[in-house]
Image (spheres, rainbow, N blue to C red):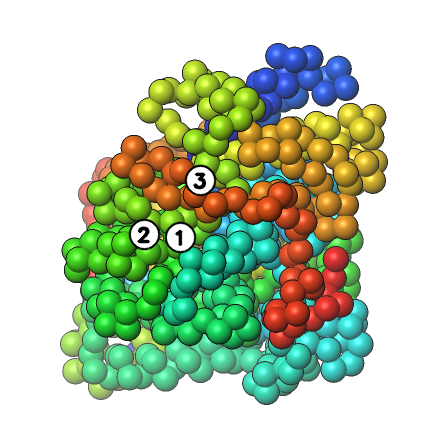
């Protein structure tokens, strides 16, 4: 992927390879060594949940921050991954505790004795994992091709993706074989490991941590590749890219599908970590809150979305513990302040400072990769 | 915190203050740690775990929707802790770690149907919000209707929070059933009853039996839109008993004269006393001891005497049909013949055979 003609446009990763490796090493030490020792079981579980949100945020950072697609409906892909994982866990539990051929407990209580046919493949762990990795991305490809080929973008794309999230949530509420509004819950084992055991819960935290590091590495590779340049070009000047002979639809579909795959994986991890998936976790509100962390952290940067998602989720949780009846106001005030004074997110504070240091002229020069995108 | 959940918290706080003023439980003063479930099942699970693990509380009181309870249930079972759930619900559940102080279906829905049948209702129209409680309730209603020769003229669901009822109310009017069974939730009731009154339907032509409208909701719907309609609960503010007069008086003293008391609040208030009595019977705050001692514990609650059924941790309670009058309050027009034993899995009703499996857990 190293064409001479593009070498002058390609921007090297800031700080170079050693800084990147160092960054990953520090993150790995924090996640794998520091967090499990300083946090209680409960807080570690909470952090594992936030890491799931961060995995979604990394994908949104790519699709929205880099690709200009305001993905207001990531709940759809999060939900697909989550429900597939939940179905597998319910089936595995039913087999383990009820013997072969038994139906999951919530169906049994509702008087359903026959497993619906389309549930059956999810009894296989291999099929489930493959479906979690592929299905959300496949849906995104089909959807993306249909939408981007027709040059639907900006607010129309945002509304469309949001409507999909709403539609999926409403549909799931009416499906009793997927638990309706209660969703799927009460999982006892995760691929044979009992979920009640703190050791296994720590293992889930490690899985979430490893996944987060992996998706950050993938997105970093994409961002600093030729494809990453093309994606930013499509975001800023879609018509010009078209005149240069590229198909912007294909460029966008790739980023959209990657974001969808990340959301699906995050959903699948969310289920054993939190212990429930219901339509309330995948509708419009959760889809918007996925985005809020990205916006606060800085959508066009690599780490902004990750830190933003974890920070917002942490703030939400601790505000609500401190002020159970007034926390929503505190959280709202924080959003207003940050978006009002730092429209490019908290990451822009460090970016502007770095620029000032480098250019030495007070940083009046604009940062090209963070130009405001019309959405 | 949503409005209805806030009032439940107020009722719990009142009970705790009363108990503390009276010397606490086993000589210990009770301290409240409040958490907000944000109406999201996953958050309810998180907060429940925090209360159990970080705050090491003796018991948790609360939960609102079925989804919130389902989300918390595994947390309480895994950590072997106690939850007191104060809302009427769709039944089909029994956990040693949850005490259900609201009604199960045979203490609310079935008595409501008995009442309608006694009144000579021969056809019903079912309207509900689309979630677990209305769907389960309507499955029970349909089975009951089949067995008792009542015709179901229609069954419609709207998404939670929906406020568009012109089509459904027109269908209800055209079908002309003897009565409507309403399992709508929250704001949908406001829109439904306004539309119902707009098309000229009244309680005299076609009464509506509601199972989710209590004293607090009447004001929002507007008394003029709902006067004369029926509700099914175990408790009303207007109940005439010493315990209730004291409860209503204490509540109004604490929170203001304009506040009303309702079934879920009373169940929450009562659940604190049920826990206190169970702890005192066990002479221990230990979960296993409380579970062991809870069966048979009785409390003279505002709704009358309630007793814990040790088999399924539900309360034995009296069912009451009420009529909404122009004072905005609900007045009892029918009362079950004594307190009803809870039967969450409807095992004692032959017509309910297909609804759940007999050997379901519990």
Q: Are marks 2 and 1 in contact (CB under 8 Å)?
A: yes
- Which dot marks residue B126? none
The span from disc 2 to disc 1 (Cα, nearest Å) is 9 Å
Sequence-wise, which precedes: disc 1 or disc 3? 1
Q: Disc 1 is attached to a residue of which chain?
A: B
- Give me the C-alpha separation between circle 1 and circle 3: 14 Å
Rate crowding at label 1 as few (under 14), some (14 to 19) or many (20 or more) other CA atoms within 10 Å.
many
Which element is circle 3 on?
strand
Instruction: Answer left or right for A134 relative to A240.
Output: right
Q: Which mark is residue B332?
A: 3
Residue A21 relative to residue B298: left or right: left
Question: CA gap, disc 2 to disc 3?
Answer: 21 Å
> Label 3 marks which chain's residue?
B
Q: Which residue corresponds to the image point at 42% horizontal and 62% vertical from the top-left?
A: B120
| SS for dot 2 | helix
Same chain for labels 2 and 1? Say yes or no: yes
Whether residue B92 is visible to the viewer of this picture, yes or no, is yes
The answer to whether residue B44 is above or below residue A285 is above
- Which chain is disc 2 placed on? B
Q: Earlier in the sequence, mark 2 or mark 1?
A: 2
Looking at the picture, tell me which residue is in the foreground, A20 or A326.
A326
Q: Which mark is residue B189?
A: 2
**Label 3 crowd (10 A; few <14 / some 14-19 / many >=20):** many
* Image location of residue B231, percent across then percent down: 41, 48
Q: Is residue A127 above or below residue A237?
A: below
Q: Looking at the picture, how far across and down is residue A266, in whole percent?
A: 53, 63
Q: Residue at x 28, y 84 (%)?
A: A146
Query: Up-down: is B336 above or below A118?
Result: above
- Residue at 67% x, 49% y: name it: B341
- Using the image as rendered, state which of residue A223 and residue A160 is in the foreground: A160
The residue that label 1 is drawn on is: B210
């Amino acid at each position: 992927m190293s064409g001479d003609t593009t070498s002058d446009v390609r921007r090297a990763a800031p700080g170079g390879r050693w800084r990147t490796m160092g960054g990953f090493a520090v993150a790995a030490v924090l996640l794998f060594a520091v967090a499990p020792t300083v946090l209680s079981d409960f807080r570690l579980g909470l952090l594992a949940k936030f890491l799931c949100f961060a995995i979604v945020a990394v994908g949104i950072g790519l699709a929205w921050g880099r690709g200009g697609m305001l993905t207001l409906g990531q709940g759809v892909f999060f939900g697909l991954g989550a429900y597939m994982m939940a179905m597998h866990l319910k089936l595995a539990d039913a087999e383990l505790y009820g013997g072969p051929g038994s139906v999951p407990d919530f169906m049994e209580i509702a008087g359903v004795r026959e497993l619906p046919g389309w549930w059956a493949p999810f009894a296989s762990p291999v099929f489930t994992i493959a479906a979690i990795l592929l299905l959300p991305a496949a849906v995104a490809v089909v959807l993306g091709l249909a939408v981007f080929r027709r040059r639907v973008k900006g607010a129309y794309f945002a509304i469309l993706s949001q409507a999909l999230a709403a539609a999926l949530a409403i549909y799931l509420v009416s499906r009793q074989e997927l638990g309706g509004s209660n969703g799927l819950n009460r999982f006892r084992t995760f691929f044979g490991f009992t979920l009640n055991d703190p050791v296994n819960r720590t293992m889930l935290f490690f899985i979430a941590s490893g996944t987060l590091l992996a998706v950050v590495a993938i997105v970093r590779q994409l961002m600093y590749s030729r494809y990453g340049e093309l994606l930013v070009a499509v975001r800023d000047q879609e018509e010009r890219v078209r005149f240069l002979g590229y198909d912007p639809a294909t460029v966008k579909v790739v980023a959209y599908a990657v974001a969808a795959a990340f959301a699906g994986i995050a959903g699948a991890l969310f289920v054993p970590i939190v212990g429930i998936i219901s339509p309330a976790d995948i509708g419009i509100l959760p889809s918007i809150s996925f985005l809020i962390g990205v916006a606060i952290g800085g959508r066009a940067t690599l780490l902004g979305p990750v830190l933003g998602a974890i920070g917002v989720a942490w703030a939400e949780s601790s505000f609500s513990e401190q002020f159970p009846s007034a926390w929503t106001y505190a959280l709202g005030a924080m959003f207003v302040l940050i978006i009002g004074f730092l429209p490019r997110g908290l990451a822009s504070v460090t970016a502007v400072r770095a620029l000032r240091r480098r250019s030495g002229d007070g940083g009046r020069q604009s940062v090209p990769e963070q130009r405001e995108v019309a959405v | 915190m949503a409005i209805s959940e806030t009032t439940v918290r107020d009722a719990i706080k009142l009970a705790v203050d009363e108990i503390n003023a009276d010397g606490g439980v086993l000589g210990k003063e009770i301290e409240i740690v409040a958490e907000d479930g944000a109406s999201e099942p996953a958050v309810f699970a998180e907060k429940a775990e925090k209360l159990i693990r970080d705050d090491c509380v003796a018991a948790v009181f609360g939960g609102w929707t079925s989804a919130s309870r389902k989300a918390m249930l595994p947390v309480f079972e895994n950590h072997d802790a106690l939850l007191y759930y104060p809302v009427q619900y769709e039944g089909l559940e029994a956990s040693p770690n949850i005490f259900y102080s609201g009604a199960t279906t045979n203490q609310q829905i079935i008595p409501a149907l008995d009442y309608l049948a006694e009144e000579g209702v021969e056809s019903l129209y079912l309207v509900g919000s689309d979630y677990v409680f209305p769907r389960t309730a309507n499955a029970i209603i349909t089975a009951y209707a089949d067995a008792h020769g009542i015709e179901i003229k229609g069954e419609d669901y709207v998404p939670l929070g929906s406020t568009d009822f012109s089509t459904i109310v027109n269908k209800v009017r055209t079908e002309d059933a003897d009565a409507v069974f309403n399992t709508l939730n929250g704001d949908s009731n406001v829109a439904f009853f306004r539309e119902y009154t707009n098309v000229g339907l009244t309680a005299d032509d076609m009464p509506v039996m509601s199972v989710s409208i209590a004293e607090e909701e009447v004001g929002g719907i507007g008394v003029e839109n709902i006067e004369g309609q029926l509700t099914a609960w175990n408790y009303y503010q207007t109940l005439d008993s010493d315990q209730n007069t004291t409860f209503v008086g204490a509540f109004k003293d604490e929170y203001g004269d304009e506040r009303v008391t309702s079934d879920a609040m009373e169940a929450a208030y009562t659940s604190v006393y049920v826990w206190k009595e169970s702890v005192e019977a066990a002479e221990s705050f230990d979960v296993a001891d409380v579970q062991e001692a809870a069966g048979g514990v009785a409390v003279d609650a505002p709704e009358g005497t309630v007793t814990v059924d040790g088999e399924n941790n539900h309360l034995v309670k009296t069912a009451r049909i009420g009529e909404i009058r122009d004072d905005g309050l609900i007045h009892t027009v029918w009362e079950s013949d004594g307190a009803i034993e809870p039967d969450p899995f409807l095992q004692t009703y032959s017509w309910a055979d297909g609804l759940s499996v007999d050997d379901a857990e519990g």
